[in-house]
Image (cartoon, helix red, strand yellow):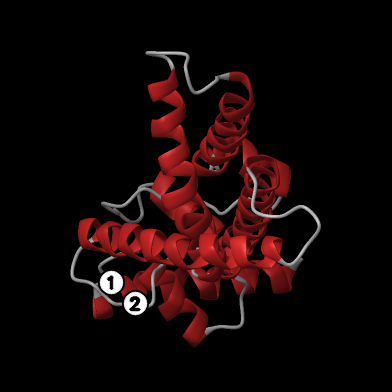
Amino acid sequence: MGRNKNEDSVLTHTIIQLLKEKNPSSVQQLVNLVEEKTSVSEQKIIECISQLQSEGKIILKEKITSPPRNFGTYLRTNAYWYWITIILSITTALTVFMISEDACPIVYVRYVLGSVFVLYLPGFTFIKALFPTQVPIKTSSENLDSIERVALSVGMSIALVPLTGLFLNYTSWGIRTTPVTFSLLALTLIFATAAIIREHKSKLTK
């Protein structure tokens, strides 16, 4: 018990000292500095910083958020892009089979969703699976980072879709609407699931 109190006291002193000496620009940077000085886990450091802030001993501009440990919690709170991708993909697949070519003007909904489904979603989920938090090209702003991700997503989709068609061409299914739609749907769902798992893990280990 006394050892735990001593460790908490040392951790508190380290946090306050680093805030004065290093003046970190973010909570994550403060956590990284404390990890370099101590052997305490990131979770405990965040809890200690949060407690010090609530007690008024330190003042931070940035709100402290602890990464979710449970994957189910993460899916409920931090995976909006994942659910939007899943819903959009399934909706597109349904429109392909339920809306005929001569059903004007509702057929334009099929065209719009189909374009997003073919030209963006496969590449987006693939890039997200490879780089769940940041794209490999360093940018000066978050907005530019988003533009890079969109560009990479479109480019990767343009590469993945023909490869999928080439693969189907050597199967008994051939390059037809049904196998192409289901193949792209399967790819998108697989990549999206891999991406959300990697993103969850990166939040825990960051």
User: Could one spot residue 46 in this view of the protein?
Assistant: yes
Above-or-below relation of 2 to 36: above
Q: Residue at left 42%, top 51%?
A: 119
Among the 4 quarters of the image, the one containing residue 106 = top left
Q: Which residue is mark 1?
A: 24
Above-or-below relation of 203 to 113: below
Q: Position of residue 46 (x, y in %)?
A: 51, 60
> Residue lying farthest right?
172
User: Could one spot residue 204 in this view of the protein?
Assistant: no
Q: Position of residue 15 (x, y in %)?
A: 41, 71
Which quarter of the image is occupied by the N terminus? Answer: bottom right
Q: Relative to the observer, which residue lies in front, 39 or 172?
A: 172
Q: Position of residue 54 (x, y in %)?
A: 42, 44
Q: Is residue 143 left or right of residue 42?
A: left
Q: Residue at left 62%, top 72%?
A: 41
Please say if the residues under marks 2 and 1 sit with CB atoms less than 8 Å apart.
yes
Q: Secondary structure at mark 2?
A: helix
Q: Label 1 crowding class (10 Å Cα cut-off): few <14, some 14-19, many 20+?
A: some
Which amino acid lies under the numbered mark 2 shown in the image of this protein?
Leu
Q: Position of residue 6 (x, y in %)?
A: 62, 73
